């Protein structure tokens, strides 16, 4: 009989999961699965709620990226009620999204991913953690904490809350920005931009070159990608069209409300996660040698599908990245590199929005009237494309909800990457703590 190696819990991720690695009689890996056994139930218990309450409810899905759910829900509510928010409201939504994004990128790179690269993937787990980072680089660690606090400070100052916001709602947002608000936030935004530039330069000089062997070997799979782009092909996080790219780089563009024509959802017996797949490519198959229907979302996917970044500093970083790794880039650990490129764009966007004169317009909401309708709201969450699909009755009460979140899109790819890592490093029944951590690193790349 073979043996099962359980990694439980998976460490340094935002949530709970375990990995089950099944060995054959010779001690080699026959299969690996990621088990997610946390049932949330939001799609059901939101039924019967007024659509205007949804942005305040669904932000509790995730304490790490509540702003993404808050804004996707607001956009779905806009569509259900048939309203278009004023331009200033859209810019304020984008501003809050950008600030939250930068804070999220800082959290993942420095707190969750960095121990594997700064301390080392084979280091003992007692030091391979955020405390080890603080001891190894105290000055950088202090700056990281300061920047995380600064992002939260900006969100709380203007929107009232950094976590579980109540700021956005169908038809617009709850308050305008004053000139005093803008003057307070602008220098802080410039600090975030400078730290974003420091972070990517630090990683390019001190992290990625040292671990090219790991990047080229851990969790590598060749699948498709999906993300949001504007009409001219630039990466956008708040609005645009979805682009679904095959592994060879060919792609289809489609509107948010067409997602059911392109994306199917399969339920696996070992997980409470759904497994979305590109149904026009064929029935989902997660085999390593010939996968079918598997695509990825999140930062590496977004910079693969986009023709360009939307801001100049980020565009320069993308060009350097593509010169080294091509398009589409398939190495899973490059998610960490792509995440920092996105951080630069979102920091630049924050500064641009605060310098936009329209950001202080008092016209920030249009009236709404309850009515029957269906609305699909979509934004790019830190973990990937986030889809909120609501249907409501004549009283504006929710009758059905479908949610596909960023991590869910990546469920199939995460299982494939973990399986690849386990099969690459576990041979003849021999493994150690460092090898098992490499399996976990394949999961952490996706920041699930």
Image: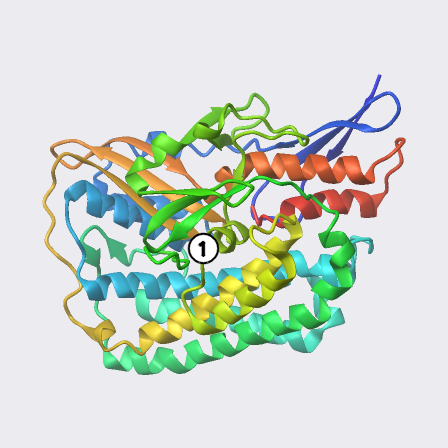
Q: Residue 142, percent across and down?
A: 62, 75
Left or right, 193 with reference to 88: right
Secondary structure of residue under mark 1: loop
In this rendering, the answer to whether 91 lies above or below 256 is: below
In this rendering, the answer to whether 27 lies above or below 50 is: above
Q: Nearer the viewer, residue 214 or 7?
A: 214
> Residue 99: in sight, yes or no?
yes
In this rendering, the answer to whether 14 lies above or below 115 is: above
Q: Nearer the viewer, residue 273 or 266?
A: 266
Q: Residue 194, percent across and down?
A: 52, 78
> Residue 161: in sight, yes or no?
no
Q: Nearer the viewer, residue 135 or 218?
A: 218
Left or right, 133 with reference to 103: right
Q: Residue furthest top?
A: 1
**Is the C terminus in the top left, top right, bottom left or bottom right quadrant?**
top right
Q: Residue 150, percent across and down?
A: 47, 73
Residue at (73%, 46%) from the top-left corner?
218
Left or right, 179 with reference to 23: left
Residue at (50%, 49%) from the top-left corner?
383
């Amino acid at each position: 009989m073979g043996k099962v190696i359980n990694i439980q819990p998976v460490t340094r991720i935002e949530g709970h999961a375990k990995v089950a690695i099944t060995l054959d009689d010779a001690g080699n890996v026959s299969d690996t699965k990621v088990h997610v056994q946390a049932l949330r139930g939001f799609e059901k218990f939101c039924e019967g709620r007024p659509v205007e309450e949804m942005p305040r409810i669904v932000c509790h899905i995730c304490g790490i990226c509540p702003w993404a759910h808050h804004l996707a829900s607001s956009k779905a509510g806009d569509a259900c009620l048939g309203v278009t928010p004023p331009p200033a409201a859209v810019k304020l939504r984008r501003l809050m999204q950008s600030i939250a994004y930068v804070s999220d990128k800082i959290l993942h790179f420095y707190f969750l991913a960095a121990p594997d690269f700064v301390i080392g993937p084979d280091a003992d787990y007692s030091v391979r953690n955020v405390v080890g980072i603080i001891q190894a680089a105290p000055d950088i660690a202090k700056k990281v904490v300061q920047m995380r606090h600064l992002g939260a400070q900006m969100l709380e100052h203007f929107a009232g809350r950094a976590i579980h916001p109540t700021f956005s709602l169908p038809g617009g947002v709850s308050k305008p920005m004053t000139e005093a608000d803008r003057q307070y936030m602008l220098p802080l935004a410039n600090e975030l931009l400078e730290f974003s530039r420091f972070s990517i330069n630090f990683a390019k000089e001190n992290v990625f070159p040292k671990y090219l062997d790991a990047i080229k070997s851990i969790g590598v799979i060749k699948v498709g990608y999906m993300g949001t782009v504007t009409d001219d092909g630039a990466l956008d996080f708040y609005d645009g069209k979805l682009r679904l790219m095959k592994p060879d780089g060919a792609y289809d563009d489609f509107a948010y409300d067409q997602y059911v024509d392109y994306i199917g959802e399969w339920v696996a017996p070992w997980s409470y996660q759904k497994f979305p797949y590109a149904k026009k490519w064929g029935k989902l198959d997660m085999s390593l040698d010939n996968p079918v229907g598997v695509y990825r979302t999140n930062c590496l996917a977004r910079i693969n599908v986009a023709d360009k970044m939307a801001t100049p500093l980020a565009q320069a970083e993308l060009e350097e990245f593509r010169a080294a790794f091509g398009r589409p880039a398939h190495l899973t650990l490059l998610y960490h590199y792509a995440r920092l490129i996105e951080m630069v764009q979102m920091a630049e966007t924050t500064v641009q929005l605060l310098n936009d004169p329209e950001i202080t317009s008092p016209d920030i909401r249009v009236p709404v009237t309850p009515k029957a309708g269906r609305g699909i709201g979509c934004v790019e969450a830190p973990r990937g494309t986030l889809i909120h699909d609501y249907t409501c009755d004549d009283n504006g009460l929710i009758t059905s909800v479908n949610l596909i979140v960023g991590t869910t899109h990546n469920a199939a790819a995460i299982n494939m990457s973990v399986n690849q890592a386990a099969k690459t490093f576990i041979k003849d029944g021999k493994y150690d703590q460092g090898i098992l951590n490499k399996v976990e690193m394949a999961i952490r790349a996706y920041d699930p």
